[in-house]
Image (cartoon, rainbow, N blue to C red):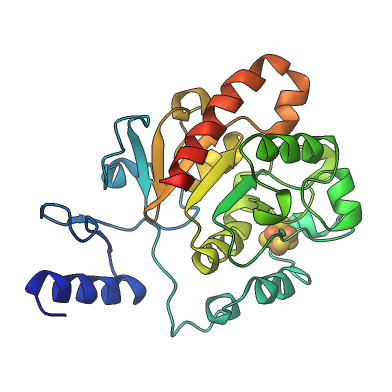
Amino acid sequence: MSDGRALARAYLEQQRLLGTDAVSLPPSGESPVDPVVTPGLRPGSGDHPAASTRSPAQPKADLPPAGLSYDPPARDLFAADPLQQVTTLAQVAELVAPCTRCRLCEARSHTVPGEGPDGARLVCVGEGPGRTEDETGRPFVGKAGELLTKILGAIGLERAQVYICNVVKCRPPENRTPQYDEIAACVPYLFRQLEILQPKVILAMGNTAAQTLLNTKQSLGALRVKVHRFRGIPVIVTYHPAALLRNPNWKKPTWDDVRIAHRLLDG
Ligand code: SF4
C-alpha cells in the first residue's frame, strides 16, 4: 500500500469485518469521493432502511437506477454463536439440520438449507420450501424449480452453477407466507450463507426475499427494475417462479429482470 487512500481502504475494510459501521468506497481507480458511511441495521429488526437507503455506486448507463442499500452488521468474530464461527456452506447446513429456533421446525420432514457451488457468482433467494422441497431437503425441485432452471438457462447458466436457497429453511404449513418472527429467527442463516459466498449478484424472487434482503416493506412492484444493494452486492428483484406458474403474464417482466442480473454478472 503506497498511498493514503489504499491505507484508508484497508483500515475501513478491517473495521467492517470487525462489525463496526458498514463502509462503502468506490473501487480503486474511480475518482475519489467522500466515503459513504452507513449505520448498520439489525437483521430482521423491521427497521425501515431510510437511514441506509443510499446509492453506494452508480449503475452503468444501460442498467436501471440505484435502489435501496441494506448493510446489516457483519459477523462478530468473537461471538459465541456457532453460526458466527462457521466458514463453509456445509457447516451452515449442519447447524440448520437440528435447528429449533422457530415453530417451523415442528412439522418439517427435512430442513432445506440451499444448494449450489461454493464459488457461485449468482445466488437465487426464494421464500421457503414447499411440499416437494420438504420431502427431499432440496430447494426448488417441484414445478417452480423446473421453471427456475429454464429461466437460468435462458441467460446461459446451468442450475448447478447457481446457489439456490430460501429465506426460511423449513416449510411453512400449507405453504403460507413465513411470519415475521420466523423470518427473524431464520435469516441469520441466509446472511451467513451470503457472507461465505460473496456472490456477484443476488436475485431476490418474490416479496419475502426482496423485503428481507432489503429490510423494507415496499412492494415487489416498487422494488423491481432497480439495482439495490445488500452489503454492497447488487440485488435484482423479480417474481417468484411459483407466482409465474399462476400468472404467466409475469414471465416477460421476469425475463427483463433476469437480463439485468445477467448484465451485472457480465460487468
Ligand atoms: S425455519 Fe429456520 S429458524 Fe425456524 S426451525 Fe427452521 S431452520 Fe430453524
87 w.r.t. 114: above or below: below
Task: Residue at 67%, 43% (x, y): give it.
Answer: 127
Q: Quadrant of the N terminus?
A: bottom left
Task: Residue at 59%, 52% (x, y): give it.
Answer: 123
7 w.r.t. 225: above or below: below
**Measured from the top left, where is residue 224 in percent x and y?**
48, 28
Q: Quadrant of ligand 1?
A: bottom right
Q: Nearer the viewer, residue 164 or 200?
A: 200
Q: Nearer the viewer, residue 84 or 199?
A: 199
Q: Is residue 61 visible?
A: yes
User: 21 left or right of 112?
Assistant: left
User: 112 left or right of 190?
Assistant: right
**Measured from the top left, where is residue 105 in percent x and y?**
79, 60
Q: Nearer the viewer, residue 27 or 44?
A: 27
**Measured from the top left, where is residue 237 in percent x and y?**
52, 35
Q: Quadrant of residue 86?
A: bottom right
Q: Quadrant of residue 252?
A: top right
